[in-house]
Image: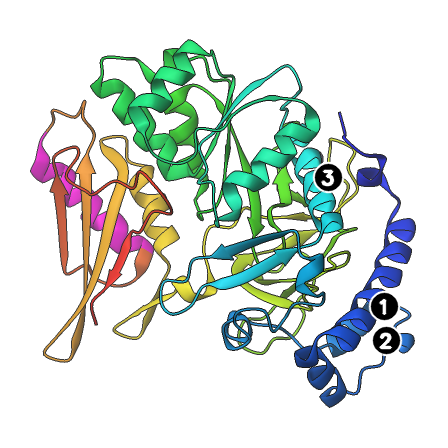
Amino acid sequence: MVYSERERLSREELEERQVERLRETVRRAREAVPFYAERLEEHGVSAAEIDSLDYLQTLPTTTKEDFRAEYPDGLFAVDWADVSRIHASSGTSGKPKIVSYTDDDLDVWAEVMARSLVAAGVSADDVVQNAYGYGLFTGGLGLHIGLEEIGAAVVPTGGGGTARQIEMLQDLESDVLCCTPSYCLYLAEQAEERGIDPRELPLERVVIGAEPFTDPMREEIEAALDVTAVDIYGLSEIIGPGVSIECEHAQDGLHIWEDHFLPEVVDPQTGKQLPPGEEGELVLTTLTKEALPVLRYRTGDVTALTYETCDCGRTCVRMDNVTGRTDDLLIVRGVNVYPSRIEEEIVAVDAVAPHYRIDLRRENNLDRIELTVEHHPSFDGDRDALHQRLHRRVEDALNVSLDALSVEPPGSIERTEVGKVKRVYDHR
Ligand SMILES: [Zn+2]
């Protein structure tokens, strides 16, 4: 089932629409945002010349540093009188990125979220518990407007309060839970601690996002809660959740609603566009945003695109599940290490629980990488043998020696009840 026929446009119809909207977006950015007026001038871009998507490569990019430099409202293309909503994305350091919406932007958001939820198999018959944080974070209210749009019964529990979450799941017989992947695991664990088998909870599916995760981690979640886990993607700078989602039918890449968000994948170092199928950094241009048009935003998320029509019949481009970010890359004694590779190895070992922590230190001018994991609650085998096996496995996958590996009892690693999980601690 599709929410809108616009999910099945032919490539020609779609591109025609995209070119028209790109021209309009550039014109608008140039007229209303001094930051873009200056950049477009430097790049010698005139909106009237845009007659194909090839033109995209000549446009300037926008970065998270630009958002910070223009804080709070330097990138807005409308007056405050026309702003209907503000959200902000939490920075790990410094000021947050402030984003704004007009009434029409909120309508677009509701539409793309409705498309996403229908693709995920959520319907008006479902009771949906939304455990994404409400407030300035786009997760909670973003899911919320989409759920209202499709007429589902929304239970706006927001983040945290896990005892209450479990109680509501049971009492209201919620079919769907929306939250981060790490929270799914936390909730399953907390249910178990209360003597409730998490697989017996009424949930049929979970809509998970806001954190990168690997396929083995998804399988772990599906097994822990006995659900289908559907991956949703988005970011505040572009609109919030609802930029793309997997279809339940194929679960084979995330459909990008490209009549609203125009994607490219570029080489993170050179910024050059890469062909379909090649992995690189996702870059997105908004095509319909009024309050905050964004040209070629460097998302930092690593993915690849495929333009083949999906088994579900949707024609829009698909992106791979995001397992990492360009700034995730850890350089340890000159060797590139991606945390997602470590996650894949850990989660694939049954005796080990899907929780881990990576610590990086520098001692006597040498990098040290230390990994902490937990053994599974049901594990009662030989801890030393498990330690050896895991050590070898992770080292083989990483091409760098592990300076310390510790296998701790269940519950030793700090859990994240609210917000995004933190697994890497770089003390260097
Ligand atoms: Zn599909």
Compared with 84, 159 (above or below) is above
Q: Which mark is residue 47?
A: 2
Q: Residue at x 50, y 64 (%)?
A: 97
Q: Nearer the viewer, residue 260 or 159?
A: 159
Amino acid of disc 2: Ala
Q: Quadrant of residue 329?
A: bottom left
Q: Residue furthest front?
A: 81
Mark 1 or mark 3: whose residue is earlier in sequence: 1
Where's ligand 1: which quadrant?
Answer: top right
Predominant SS along the magenta part: helix
Query: Could you classify mark 3 by the number of other residues whose Cα lies within 10 Å: few (under 14), some (14-19), or many (20 or more)?
Result: some
Q: Do the numbered discs 1 and 2 sit on residues whose CB atoms are within 8 Å? A: yes
Residue 287 x/y as whole percent: 77, 58
Which residue, given by chain and number where applicable, does mark 3 sit on?
111
Marks 1 and 3, how far apart at CA: 22 Å
Is 401 part of what is drawn in magenta? no
Image-based side of 287 in relation to 403, left or right: right
Could one spot residue 348 in this view of the protein? yes
Question: Which residue range is magenta in the image?
Answer: 382-397
Q: Quadrant of the C terminus?
A: bottom left
Q: Nearer the viewer, residue 29 or 77?
A: 77
Amino acid of disc 1: Arg
Residue 83 x/y as whole percent: 67, 57
Q: Which mark is residue 23?
A: 1
Which SS class for mark 3? helix
Compared with 334, 314 (above or below) is above
Q: Quadrant of the N terminus?
A: top right
Image-based side of 89 in relation to 40, left or right: left
Q: Residue at x 81, y 34 (%)?
A: 4
